[in-house]
Image: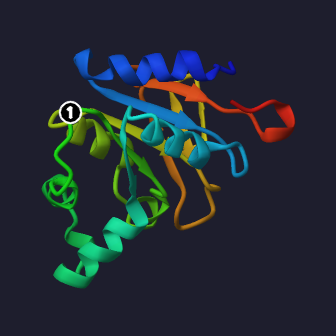
Amino acid sequence: MQEGWDVISQKVRHLPSHLHPLYVIAGAQGSGKTTLARRIANEGLGVYINLSWALARYLLHQGDLALFTIHHLLMCCEETLSSVPFVFDNIELLMTLKIQVIPFFQDFSRHHPAVVIWPGSVEDGVFQYSMPSRDDYYYFRDTVVMVTNLENKNGGNV
């Protein structure tokens, strides 16, 4: 289901009041996920975090991504004290590291509301990224996480 900006922005605004303040915006390449993530930040509804950049910064200081934890992610974000959600984009590296991404962000959201830009599909509570034969393949089932699926730009984008 395609949701417009008004619906998405309302979900982000009300996210801190949720028991599980995690919201996933999913879509294929070219669906406008990053544009939407930046709009959320530009309108003051969240703080945009390019996770690839944050992980590169962590790697420069710590040296081993295999040991990356929720605590480290919180430390990467601590410079920006904010009451609005963090909006995490470019999360693909987490799949390559074989991190259970959705549980990882569920744990993070216990400390701070989070919007995660998901670079794959979510249907009926099934999160998928990549193909089963690839090393970065990710599959997880969770029907509790709030999700919005974006259509490709050809199908009408937010």
Q: Is residue 29 above or below residue 92?
A: above
- Looking at the image, residue 139 sits to the left or right of residue 66; the answer is right
Relative image position of residue 146 (x, y in whole percent) = 44, 22
Residue in the picture at 23% in, 79% down: 64
Q: Residue furthest right?
A: 154
Relative image position of residue 48 (x, y in whole percent) = 40, 49
Near mark 1 (Cα within 10 A), the count class, few <14, some 14-19 or many ≥20, is few
Q: Is residue 95 above or below residue 126?
A: below
Q: How many labels sit on residues?
A: 1
Relative image position of residue 13 (x, y in whole percent) = 37, 21
Residue in the picture at 25% in, 22% down: 16
Query: Is residue 120 in view from this perspective?
Result: no
Residue in the picture at 14% in, 59% down: 75
Relative image position of residue 27 (x, y in whole percent) = 64, 40
Question: Which residue has dot 1 on it?
Answer: 83
Splitting the image into 4 quarters, where does residue 17 fall? top left
What amino acid is at disc 1? Ser
- Give 158 or 56, whichever is nearer the viewer: 158
